[in-house]
Amino acid sequence: MRLRWFTDVYHNPAMLGANGFAATPEQAREYLEELRDLGCTGVLLNTVTRYEEQAEARAEVVGLK
């Protein structure tokens, strides 16, 4: 789905790898922890489908749920 979003909406499928990532909640948590360890202090998490479900998953990943 995410590849289709970058292909159909942004017309640039390479953006997924350059400007985003697709992952399970566990993979996302690991990735965010790596970014934190590298000194990152902010990340924009943008939902492209199933907004309510994804908002709940994000909250769980970042420890708000």
Image: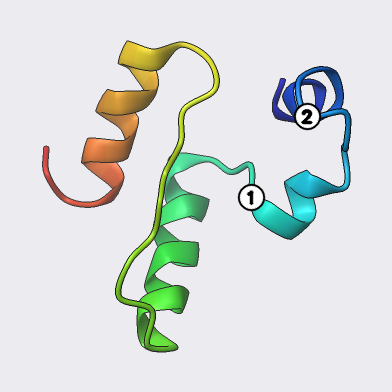
Q: Which residue is mark 1?
A: 20
Q: How is the image coloured?
A: rainbow
Q: Amino acid at mark 2?
A: Tyr
User: In the figure, residue 43 lies in which quadrant?
Assistant: bottom left
Question: Residue visible at 52% across and 53% down?
Answer: 27
Disc 2 marks which residue?
10
On the image, the x and y values in percent for residue 12 come to: 88, 37
The local crowd at label 2, few if under 14, some if 14 to 19, many if 20 or more residues have their Cα within 10 Å, is few
- Disc sitting over residue 4 in the figure: none
Quadrant (top left/top right/bottom left/bottom right) for the C terminus = top left
25 lies above or below 54: below
| Residue type at the position of mark 1 | Gly
Distance of label 2 from label 1 (alpha carbons): 12 Å
For the point 24% across and 51% down, the residue is 62
- Judged left or right of residue 30, residue 63 is left
Q: From what the image shows, is residue 19 above or below residue 56?
A: below
Left or right: 50, with 16 as reference point: left
Find numbered disc 2 in the image and state the secondary structure of the residue it sits on.
loop
Q: What residue is shown at x 70% (from left), y 28% (from top)? A: 2
